[in-house]
Amino acid sequence: MGYQGKGMDKARQFLPSGRIVLSAFALSIGAARAGDASSLSTGDLKKLSLEELMDIEITSVSKRPENLSEAASAIQVITQEDIRRSGATSLPEALRLASNLQVAQLNTREWAISARGFNATFANKLLVMIDGRTVYTPLYSGVFWDAQHVLLEDVDRIEVISGPGGTLWGSNAVNGVINIVTKSAEKTQGLYLAGGGGGLLRDFGEARSGGKTGGNLFYRIYGRHVDRNGLVNADGTDTHEPSALSQGGFRMDWRRSEADAFMAQGDMYGSDFQAPGPGETDLNGQDILANWTHAFSPESDLQAQVYFDRTWRKAVFTPTVAFTDELKTYDFDFHHRFPLGSWQNIMWGAGYRWMQDEVENFQVFSFLPAHKDLSRFNAFAQDEIALLSRRVKITLGTKLEHEEYSGFNLQPSARIAWSPDTRQTLWGAVSRAVRTPSRIDVEFFAPTPPYAAPTLHYAGGPDFESEGLLAYEVGYRVQPMQRLSLSLATFYNQYDGLRSLEFADVPNLGLEFRNGLDADSRGAELSGDFQASSWWKLRGGYTYMESDIWQKPGHTDLEIPFGKWDDPAHQFSLQSMLDLPAGFEMNVSGYYVSSLPDPHVQPRMNYSAGLVWRHRGLEVSVYGRDLADDQDPEFGSGPQREEIPRSVSGKVAWRL
Amino acid sequence: MGPLGLLLLALALIRGAAAAAEPGMEYQVKAVFLYNFTQFVDWPAEAFAKPDAPLVIGILGRDPFDTYIDDVVRGEKAGGHPILVKRFRDIEAARECQLLFVGGADARRLDSVAAVLKDRMILTVGDSGEFSKRGGMIDFITRQGKIRLQINMETVRAARLTVSSKLLRLADIVEPGKG
């Protein structure tokens, strides 16, 4: 393993520590923004004086080019600076900055987000974590994006890995993994106040206060409230679907000694979304997490983490018709790393999760039984072997998982990376990942018995099994010059047993879910960062993908003709961050998404632009979003389909 | 399922998975420090077999620098001596270098380093936090996320090495003999 921090440094590195501030970088390159702390070349470091060398922070892990140049996977990182300068006001908006994701907004609260395709309203092949806390729902193995919020100001970085991550992260990390990592409390000292409003983002206010007690205990508390207006209908009229969100939380980071570090954090939120007429969706939730890292030596440490998460939602259709879901998740995980001999590093660990899901069903659909306890155990081991003067690294590992519906699942992977020099890495991987069954696959009924229509109703499939993926990846990362880094990842995915909706065998029993589809997909993801000068940074990407889906012999899927998954073949994105004189910044981010086949959505090219003025701790900005057209749909079809209008909003932020 | 801490560990993995080329910032900076030491320390002429013999930076045991340090010193010279990096498995083999880096905190190893290299003209550098107090010469100490230097002047003098005042000015001087 390359980077072996010392004692506490190691421990801090495992905690989502804050973004590096490389003052030395600023000295040598002349860029004064922390976000520019890209890799210092060997030559740059050698030019520094001893004093400057002693001023470099060495403990952070968030240095993008360094991580990226080494990573044997298709990882793209969105930094705090990228987020701030994009003017993003929510997590999904920030995720648009990762060109290896398919991101489409459905309405003011719902998004369809996937990696490497198979995107849908209920996309189910992406694993999302916020500071190590999984936020997927066992109802459908997807993410309720309307319940996932963070104070973007305190996000250190978002790591988007396209491709399977099952060996490390476990099931559901099929097509990709999103890690949202917030800053250490040590990096968020002081006061942050912000507020603003405008079009779609009607008004918002945010506050955070960070402090320190004793020598080594850092903390922060935050609160925020956001009101959003609804999107528009195809004819341009307001959908009248405003939403309101309130959220607050804390984080503490304590470095007890050189060897031990503790982190604790918690959040609570409440939100409601109005629908036209009597409909509305209410949700609230709380979570708390604790993490302990103990370093035995620079190369060996143990980390344990425990969390509790409760999330509740109620979808009201009419005053008497509503569906509620309450999910409580208890989770414990640990892992241990140690070197074996001089050229191997072993990591192993285990975890247990217990989820209590309780729904209140209604006539239209139901999950039966209404209350379900799901337990999940996993263990994994991985060996990293360094060969040929550490220029070649082979990583072999597997995860073994046991869960309620499908029993044991094995998710092995083999990765190899070759770095002929410090500026380039060629890597390849073969991995298996699974999506384990979720409640909808097995326990779903529509309509709810005994309301079942005599001939046509849906039901979960009692024999539904895990969906499997075997993925082949080859990638290349290169930093041809100090200011430019490029990454190309290619993949070939073979899916086995994807969910199909089929006629049940017994006549008049209706429809049920089965594993009746196979598929393969191919694609390439190109991304790059270019520091054109000390005052102009560009980042961009292009993603191509295509897929073939077919029915297994003896299976007929009834969903395919109606558009099951909807993925663009081509996606481009470009973000420009330009520093102007007198504290001004001009930021533009744009994208192109080719047409979605079925349901058909026109190709869309859109961009956002923002003008920012920064003076000491004060920041004033105005952003125009989706400026290219009056309004555009992004996903779906039919008269209910909502469109995203052009909008403008302003923000004033004060950092003390 | 295995997320949570695994997210963090996975970061480490991803970083480690292909870390063939660059070590973390910590060891990049330390590698550059080692190079700087060759410029800020004077060895007696007898430390070299010939006037144009290479100045060898030895790395004892586990190598945290990967190939980074080779890139740092490539083409560089110290007082007319081309700089070379060599890796050593045990301390006996490491007698022929001019600067020796001993990573990690293995106490037995520290003691044997001090014993075997006693009075040889080798600048010993470690990063255990104990190194300079246990017979080593320069110790990298991490304080508030930054590197500090601790220099044991007794052992430096015993090895007949001369440390530039520019370096001494920035370092903490330890004199174990004086308590």
Image (cartoon, grey):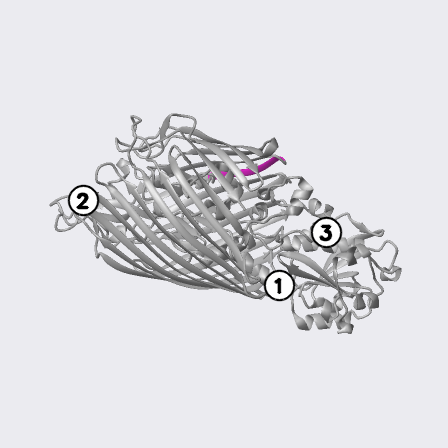
- Amino acid found under the numbered disc labelled 3: Glu
**On the image, numbered disc 3 is attached to which residue?**
A51
Q: Residue drawn at (54%, 52%), measured in percent from left and top?
A: A189
Q: Is residue A384 visible?
A: no
Label 2 CA crowd tier, 10 Å (few <14, some 14–19, many 20+): few
**On the image, numbered disc 2 is attached to which residue?**
A319
Task: Give the image location of residue A617, x and y in percent.
Answer: 56, 42
Q: Nearer the viewer, mark 2 or mark 1?
A: 2
Label 3 CA crowd tier, 10 Å (few <14, some 14–19, many 20+): few
Q: Residue drawn at (23%, 45%), measured in percent from left and top?
A: A316
- Amino acid found under the numbered disc labelled 1: Ser
Image-quadrant location for residue A94: top left
**On the image, numbered disc 1 is attached to which residue?**
A342
Q: Mark 2 and mark 1, same subunit? A: yes
* Labels 2 & 3 near each other (Cβ < 8 A): no
Query: Does B38 sit above or below residue A561?
Result: below
Find the distance from the CA under tag 2 to the CA under tag 3: 69 Å
Q: Nearer the viewer, residue A203 or A180?
A: A203
Q: Chain of mark 2?
A: A
Q: Chain of mark 1?
A: A
For label 3, the SS is helix
For label 2, the SS is loop
Which residues make up the magenta segment? A524-533
